[in-house]
Image (cartoon, helix red, strand yellow):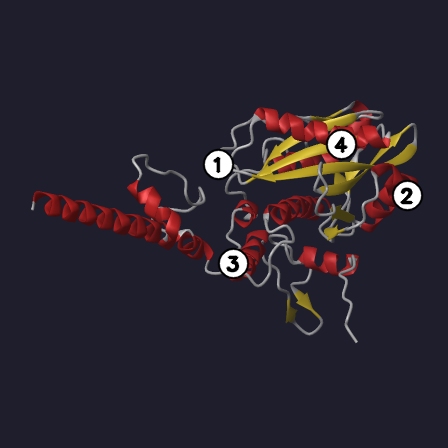
Amino acid sequence: AVAEIAFLPDPVCAWLAMSQMIKNCKLFETVGTGLIGFNRCPSHWSKQAIKIYSTGLSRPEKGDPGEVAAAFYMLACGDELRYQLKPDLTQLSVPLKQWIAKLQGDKNNEQGDKSVTGGGVGTDARVNFIQVCRDYLRYSLDEIQDAGLFKHWYLAGQAFYAYSSCPAYDMVVPLRYTFQKKLHYVPMLVSVKNRLYYSPNERTSALEAMRRVFEDAKIATGACMLLLIGLKNTKRESRELNFSHNDISTVEIEVPTGDDFGATDLATCSTCVGGEVSEVMASHASLALLAQGKVKAKHLLRCKTSDNDKSTKLLEEIKAGYRNIDHASSTDTNARSNA
């Protein structure tokens, strides 16, 4: 017989994991007869994920850790808010405006008044998920809404990754707001881009692609988030999310370089066994031509890789070796010609 394995959503495990990934959380400092909890700050866990990916034994489904890092960042921001609002972690949902402010890394806007507008609807809106699960089904947003799944996911504290070939978005996050004394459950579509640079035109196109998903499904209320992680420069000013009833609102999030949770390092980590050293070795043949070229190649390694890193040193040693070989060959050729 062949075992069939599936990883199902488990809110209890997610809640326990959350309690161990919040800085200074003492909820399980001692349990029973003095059992010490395993609480560590989020950056500790992102480093553990980097170690796992760098072995090559486990890799993100799409081969790019950016999507996982983005989910980790969104969860860590929400976890901090949950702990601040309710230290016993019995309240899982958090205000949308404060969560957006947290994602933007704006420490002067902790209440989120500059992050989400839209009157009472925007002020009241909340987001709720403590785990992100993979969902392989190809249902459309209108089918999800008709089945009541947005409400189900919100109450279950669950967001999900879209199927691997989904063209417009990578994640779906459940939101809730009140309009005319009635609770409404709607989706926020999230498109994750793990790039060094993403142009203004590309940003506009990504947001428009998500808006079209809402239009095709004839869903009038929702939100679109473009989350950029791994950017070399994060200088663009934060923009507010104008969330309101019967409107599809959009927002861009640039994850700060060197964020407190280590999400950027996770997004840009190597998934090759041996890390960047192995990546340099795998590109060994290309370096021969690069070393002989007149134009000096720039940014061959990740922008966070320092000049003292062993992969940088190996890269320069290989290039220098090829330059020496080329120089020796040219000298020998000239000597033979003169002879």
Say which residue label 1 marks.
232
* Crowd class of label 1 (few under 14; some 14 to 19; many from 20; radius 10 Å): some
Proximity of marks 4 and 1: CB atoms separated by less than 8 Å: no
* Crowd class of label 2 (few under 14; some 14 to 19; many from 20; radius 10 Å): few
Label 1 vs 3, first from the N-terminus:
3
Label 2 vs 4, first from the N-terminus:
2
Which mark is on residue 54?
3
Please tell me whether mark 4 sits on a helix, a strand or a loop.
strand
Q: Amino acid at mark 3?
A: Ser
* Crowd class of label 3 (few under 14; some 14 to 19; many from 20; radius 10 Å): some
Camera-side mark, 4 or 3: 3
Question: Which residue is pictured at 44% across the width and 44% down the height?
Answer: 304
Label 2 vs 3, first from the N-terminus:
3
Q: Is residue 261 above or below residue 186?
A: below
Measured Cα–Cα span from mark 2 to mark 1: 40 Å
The location of residue 57, given as percent across then percent down, is: 57, 63
When asked about the image quadrant of residue 218, the answer is: top right
The location of residue 258, given as percent across then percent down, is: 50, 42
Label 4 vs 1, first from the N-terminus:
4
Please tell me whether mark 3 sits on a helix, a strand or a loop.
helix
Which mark is on residue 148?
2
When asked about the image quadrant of residue 206, the answer is: top right
Question: Which residue is pictured at 78% across the width and 57% down the height?
Answer: 9
Viewer-proximal residue among 266 and 162? 162
Viewer-proximal residue among 151 and 137? 137
Q: Amino acid at mark 2?
A: Gly
Say which residue label 4 marks.
223
Please tell me whether mark 2 sits on a helix, a strand or a loop.
loop
Measured Cα–Cα span from mark 4 to mark 3: 35 Å
